[in-house]
Image (tube, rainbow, N blue to C red):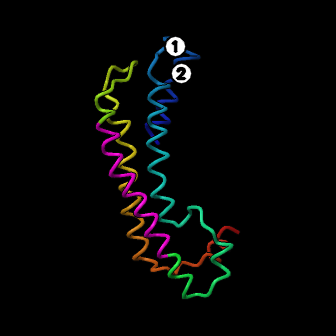
Amino acid sequence: MLLLVLDVWVGVVDRYLLHLQLPWPEVLARYLMIWAALLAISCGIARREHIGLSILLDRIPENLRRISLMAMDIVAMALFLYVFWFGIGFALDGSRRQALIFGLSLGPAYAAVPVSAGLAAIQLLLVLFRDLGRQGLVDQAEEAI
C-alpha cells in the first residue's frame, strides 16, 4: 500500500507540477492495486469479514451450524487451492509477456493470483483450526455496532 500511495503521489506531482508526462505511474499503480486487493482477501479471512450467509446459518441448530461452517471453510479452501494451482500457469504465461510501457515481464504482476490464492488457502486452514466452526455469526453482527 505504501508503494501504491507513493506511486500515485509521483503521478500527481508529475501531472500538475513537473509536466514530464511520465508514462509508468498509472500502469504501476494498476498492478500495485491488484496486488493490494488480492492480498487483502487473506486479511478478511483472518477476521472472518468475508461474505457469509448468516441469515440461513442463524436459523439452524448449533451442531449443524458448526458442521456447515467447517464445510464452507473446506470448500472455500479447495477453491483457493484450485485458483493457486491454475494461477501458477497463469503467472508463467504472463512471464512470457512484456508490459509495453516498462518493457519488463508481466510475471510479477500475474503472480498476484497464485500468491494471494495460496495465502488465502493457508489462512482458511488456520482459521478453520482456530474456530472449528464455533465462530459466532451473531457476535460478528454485534461487533459491527
Q: In terms of sequence position, does the residue under pointer 2 or pointer 1 come before the other? A: 2
Amino acid found under the numbered disc labelled 1:
Leu
Callouts 2 and 1 close, C-beta under 8 Å:
yes
In front of the other: 145 or 89: 89
Q: Which residue is mark 2?
A: 13
Identified at 40% across, 63% down, the residue is 78
Q: Is residue 101 above or below residue 44?
A: above
Identified at 49% across, 32% down, the residue is 30
- Dot 1 lies on which element? helix
Mark carried by residue 18: 1
Left or right side of 8 for 110: left
Identified at 55% across, 85% down, the residue is 64
In front of the other: 4 or 120: 120
Identified at 45% across, 58% down, the residue is 42
Amino acid found under the numbered disc labelled 2:
Val
Query: What is the x, y in percent for residue 27?
Result: 46, 26
Q: Is residue 140 above or below residue 86?
A: below
Q: Is residue 51 above or below residue 92?
A: below
- The magenta span reads 70-92
Query: What is the x, y in percent for residue 41?
Result: 48, 54
Left or right side of 38 for 108: left
